[in-house]
Image: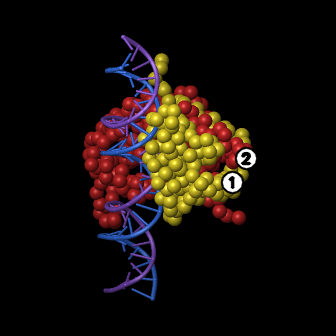
Chain colours: A yellow, B red, C blue, D purple
Amino acid sequence: MSVRKPVERPSGPPPAVMQKIRQHLSEPELQGLRTVFILRATAQHVDNAISEWMAGSVGSVARYQILMALWASKGKGISHKHIVAAMGVTRATVSGLMAALERDGLVKSQVDGEDRRKLIARLTAKGEAVIKKQHELNLVKFRAVFSSFTSEQLSSLTTLLHRFREAFAAPDEP
Amino acid sequence: MSVRKPVERPSGPPPAVMQKIRQHLSEPELQGLRTVFILRATAQHVDNAISEWMAGSVGSVARYQILMALWASKGKGISHKHIVAAMGVTRATVSGLMAALERDGLVKSQVDGEDRRKLIARLTAKGEAVIKKQHELNLVKFRAVFSSFTSEQLSSLTTLLHRFREAFAAPDEP
DNA sequence: GTCAGATAGTTAGGTGCCAAACTGATTCCG
DNA sequence: CGGAATCAGTTTGGCACCTAACTATCTGAC
């Protein structure tokens, strides 16, 4: 199933990155920079942690995201373009992921009769079994992981992340 | 300088990912899952945005992180091991990054006389010029980007990110 | 009707990240 | 002293991303 196997997880100390840079940066920039680094490290860690418990079936968060979208479509299928939009990555990335999923027999794409440029992807029986099983496991895992968060904390986190991203989006108009 | 040139930035709509999965997930899991996806997307976007204005000199956030650490050491130099710890990535990753930086002439490593396993890295003159120039630019950019955030918001974000990461770290003790 | 442009997907080349296996140097211990 | 364990860094191979350049297909404007 072409997957990342777990084992060692170096993880390293909390990224108390570069405490001495104060010399060069004033306070607001320092704090922003620190936030960027922590954001990177956190995303990386979470991704690794999840990949670990998805190894052997779904395999990675990206693949999970696709399979969930397909599952949610309830057999109607979804165009690759739609997946691109839903995931927020490029066509090229999705193209590669879909090829791998198809190679693994979890997914099957076929050209749309109406518009022969389009590829419509559907879960195979195997794919559906895999995502269902993964979903069961995830219920348990996520419950354990998020038990220490209130709903308000999570939504505050997503709001801040969203704003953070927006701030980087287009800092170019006067 | 081996760099990623900007141009197209597909970016896609806000990852209003998978609105229909409600059928399969209960509320807390749904919210957690959504947060994970947004975390991924945000980290990716921020990384891309920063890479864009670092193209042509430093080149990427990871490289910037290393050069800053080296700069902050004020010519004393830093062992590769130290960089690994500071960045929170694996030896293998740093090994590759350092090789690329050396190839680009920004950095020079030499074996430590005391412990001949260790490599001590230092900025070259070129490397120092590059990081200084990048720093000037960053002051401007970061000021623009973070102007809409209060210090409290940023620190609340970093705190939540930190907790989020911890939650994923070791969900394995009773 | 045709032909330029937009659109959907693919491919090639490159980056950052990881795990695992390997090399050399150092330290520890009997 | 000498071999085992440990430690620093490299290499190999894989995944998820990206950009840029390409192929088909469709659409729209003349």
Rendering coords of residue B154 (x, y %): 58, 36
Residue C23 shown left or right of residue D18 in the figure: left
Q: How many C-alpha atoms fall within 10 Å of the one at disc 1: few (<14), some, or many (≥20)? A: some
- Give the chain of mark 1: A
Between B150 and A91, the one nearer to me in the picture: A91
Rendering coords of residue B73 (x, y %): 38, 48
Which residue carries the number 2 mark?
B26
Which residue carries the number 1 mark?
A139
Residue A166 shown left or right of residue B19 in the figure: left
Between B148 and A58, the one nearer to me in the picture: A58
Q: Secondary structure at mark 1?
A: helix
Residue B28 shown left or right of residue D23 in the figure: right
Tag 1: residue type?
Leu
Residue A50, above or below A66: below
User: Residue visible at 56% across and 27% down?
Assistant: B148
Q: Secondary structure at mark 2?
A: loop
- Give the chain of mark 2: B
Q: How many C-alpha atoms fall within 10 Å of the one at disc 2: few (<14), some, or many (≥20)? A: few
Tag 2: residue type?
Ser
Q: Is label 1 in contact with label 2 (beta carbons under 8 Å)?
A: yes
User: Residue visible at 64% across and 57% down?
Assistant: A133
User: Residue visible at 51% across and 37% down?
Assistant: A112
